[in-house]
Image (cartoon, rainbow, N blue to C red):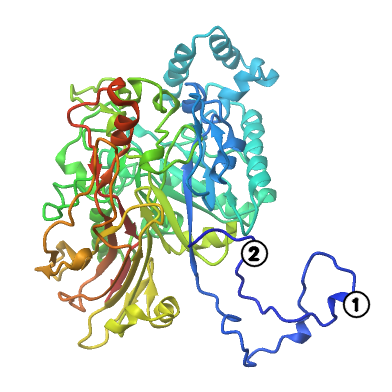
């Protein structure tokens, strides 16, 4: 129901032309004469001045192409042009040889190639003269051309680990960056498909994942000729923010950073001190919340909402949990976990806000792929994996390839996580009115976004003080929601005497996917003694199940047939709505609320692979064959 259309829904007044079309030369554009607009005059059409976001746009903010060295050097030859074509719905041939197509086009895409030695692989492929004039560039070029691809990749990896750019050539970086900019310009079509400009800053301090995707609001004239900030420049997020500030000051543009899920950060993503060892200050909190309004809570490399050890009373907490260590050097310790997951970071943010006056961890939540295949596939039955060596049809490597632990840990811990343990992907839902760079970026910046694990569930939530149960059924649900409360990503303050916040939620299943099992509210709060708490409330249960002690009466059921990798939608519901009032509200306590929508059980990409390939593949005994996909909305915060 949210297919893109070729005209943007805009909030300006569209009135008749002063001169009939027949009496003037047609220019292909419809204009408005300012003299024909009278503000405040009643209009028959009720939508003339409607301006609130009225549709969800689907996209991937984190896709790598052959221009990322850790993709292009290991077999990916699909560049940005084909990545955009694929996202727009065209059939593209993957590097491994299989043809691929999305069930429906995406609405937007960010090609976020690694800034570190950006475009090295295509430069080698074309024997770029400027690359060959660089001694190190010629050396790795000759390794590749001799056929020693993995030797060349290891050679580059060893240099990158030193933290010093082996090429050190800004002109080469600009050349490739401008190619990506030009590609985005070719495929950007406002109102139909948006190609945002961006890149990934790949901070890997002591093999800990502190990566950020940097996304610009701006057009090509402002981003062209940039040299993206890289890990060679610094591993410290504060230095990235300074670079972003300089960009805005010099280019008069806008830019944000989105942190990756922190499960491979070994406690550094939401640490209690900065990377240089200082305690968090008000200034730090202000800068972090300004430059990083979003968090990539779920993607191929595991889910980062919460951990079962941190949320033992949450039966949905153990979802693609990656908790062995970082990328390979060090194993995981239990005290690291609270500083890695979204729910705990949101709670700790309340404590910092009480102490500093500003919340450093006040973020919305989105999902993304982090695919290195150039293909933004998110559905389980269409999984083209993390990287080219694990694409469909690539044999045993598709399941056994190591994602972490390629290099043995220094402390002897087994930190290896293999590809069969990956999610198919994550996906970002953005509430917007128009499909263009400015509108999408603005929606992300105000946090009116949500994450899914690849499904296209439509979820809308409002919080206020005066919603009634009957409001769930209003035909003007969204208009009433905005007029009387705040949407996801918003703030409530100063509760009226004796009142608790009320919530309106609507969820609609993916039209090509599974029914809904339940709708939940996840609450975190800070009590008067400075202690944080969390609680999960089931607020709507499909199938006529009641709610007892905040939980649905029994599971929704399971219709999955593993032999055929299929399921039926004769359990659950396609549409679920709910009104909820916080029964445990204390007006003096800071709190946040976000909605989690859970689908009925469905097959995983491993189950689809098994049904397709049959006995030709052997899966590990602990392979996850059935799961329940979900959506996480951005929080709504309450401040006394």
Q: Is residue 106 left or right of residue 206?
A: right
Q: Is residue 422 left or right of residue 527?
A: right
Instruction: Give above or below for 110 relative to 145.
Output: below
Q: What is the crowding at mark 1: few (fewer than 14 residues within 10 Å), some, or many (at least 20)?
A: few
Which quarter of the rendering shows the C terminus? Answer: bottom left
Which residue is at 61% across, 19% downward?
125
Q: Is residue 343 left or right of residue 460?
A: left
Image position, residue 626 (x, y; %): 23, 42
Q: Can residue 467 be seen?
A: no
User: Which residue corresponds to mark 2?
Assistant: 7
Instruction: Give above or below for 456 relative to 416.
Output: below
Which residue is at 32% across, 20% downward?
396
Q: Is residue 553 left or right of residue 575?
A: left
Judge by depth and name the residue closer to the eye, 540 or 293: 540
Image position, residue 600 (x, y; %): 25, 53
Q: What is the crowding at mark 2: few (fewer than 14 residues within 10 Å), some, or many (at least 20)?
A: few
Image position, residue 323 (x, y; %): 21, 37
Residue 543 is drawn in which quadrant? bottom left
User: Which residue corresponds to mark 1?
Assistant: 23
Q: Which tag, 1 or 2, sits closer to the chain's start?
A: 2
Report the Cα–Cα distance between label 1 and label 2: 25 Å
């Amino acid at each position: 129901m949210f297919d893109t259309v070729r005209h943007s829904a805009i909030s300006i007044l569209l009135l008749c032309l002063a001169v009939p079309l027949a009496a003037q030369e047609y220019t292909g554009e419809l204009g408005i004469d300012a003299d024909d607009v009278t503000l405040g005059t009643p209009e028959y059409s009720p939508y003339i001045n409607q301006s609130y976001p009225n549709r969800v746009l689907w996209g991937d903010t984190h896709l790598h192409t052959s221009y990322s060295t850790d993709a292009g050097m290991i077999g990916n030859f699909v560049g940005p042009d084909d990545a955009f074509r694929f996202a727009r719905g065209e059939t593209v041939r993957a590097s491994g040889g299989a043809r691929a197509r999305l069930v429906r086009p995406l609405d937007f895409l960010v090609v976020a190639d690694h800034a570190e030695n950006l475009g090295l692989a295509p430069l080698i492929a074309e024997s770029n003269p400027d690359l060959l004039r660089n001694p190190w560039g010629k050396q790795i070029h000759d390794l590749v051309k001799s056929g020693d691809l993995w030797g060349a990749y290891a050679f580059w990896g060893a240099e990158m680990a030193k933290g010093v750019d082996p090429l050190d050539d800004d002109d080469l970086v600009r050349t490739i960056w401008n190619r990506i900019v030009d590609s985005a310009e070719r495929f950007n079509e406002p109102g139909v498909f948006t190609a945002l400009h961006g890149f990934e800053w790949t901070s890997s301090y002591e093999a800990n994942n502190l990566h950020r995707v940097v996304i610009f609001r701006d057009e090509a004239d402002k981003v062209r000729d940039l040299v993206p900030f890289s890990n060679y420049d610094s591993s410290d997020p504060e230095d990235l923010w300074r670079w972003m500030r300089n960009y805005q000051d010099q280019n008069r543009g806008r830019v944000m950073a989105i942190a990756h899920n922190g499960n491979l950060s070994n406690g550094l993503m939401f640490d209690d001190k900065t990377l240089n060892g200082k305690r968090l200050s008000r200034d730090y909190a202000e800068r972090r919340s300004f430059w990083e309004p979003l968090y990539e809570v779920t993607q191929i490399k595991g889910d980062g909402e919460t951990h079962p050890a941190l949320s033992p009373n949450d039966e949905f907490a153990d979802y693609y949990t990656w908790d062995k260590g970082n990328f390979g050097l060090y194993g995981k310790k239990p005290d690291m976990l609270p500083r890695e997951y979204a729910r705990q970071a949101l709670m700790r943010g309340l404590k910092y806000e009480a102490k500093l006056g500003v919340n450093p961890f006040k973020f919305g939540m989105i999902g993304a792929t982090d695919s290195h295949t150039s293909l933004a596939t998110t559905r389980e039955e269409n999984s083209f994996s993390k990287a080219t060596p694990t694409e469909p049809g690539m044999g045993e490597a598709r399941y056994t390839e190591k994602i972490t632990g390629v290099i043995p840990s220094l402390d002897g811990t087994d930190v290896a996580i293999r590809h069969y343990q990956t999610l198919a992907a994550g996906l970002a839902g953005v509430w917007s009115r128009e499909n263009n760079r400015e509108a999408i970026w603005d929606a992300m910046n105000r946090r009116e976004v949500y994450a899914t694990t690849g499904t296209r569930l439509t979820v809308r939530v409002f919080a206020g003080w005066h919603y009634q149960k009957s409001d769930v059924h209003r035909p003007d649900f969204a208009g009433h929601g905005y007029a009387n409360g705040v949407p996801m990503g918003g703030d409530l303050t100063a509760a009226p005497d004796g009142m608790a916040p009320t919530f309106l939620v609507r969820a609609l299943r993916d039209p090509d996917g599974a029914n809904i099992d339940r709708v939940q509210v996840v609450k975190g709060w800070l009590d008067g003694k400075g202690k944080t708490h969390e609680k999960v409330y089931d607020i709507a249960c499909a199938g006529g199940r009641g709610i007892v002690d905040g939980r649905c009466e029994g599971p929704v059921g399971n219709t999955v047939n593993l032999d055929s990798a299929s399921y039926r939608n004769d359990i659950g519901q396609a549409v679920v709505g709910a009104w909820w009032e916080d029964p445990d509200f204390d007006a003096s306590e800071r709190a946040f609320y976000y909605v989690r929508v859970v689908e009925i059980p469905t097959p995983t990409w491993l189950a689809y692979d098994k049904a397709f390939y049959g006995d030709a593949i052997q899966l590990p005994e602990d392979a996850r064959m059935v799961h329940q996909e979900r959506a996480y909305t951005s929080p709504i915060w309450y401040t006394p």
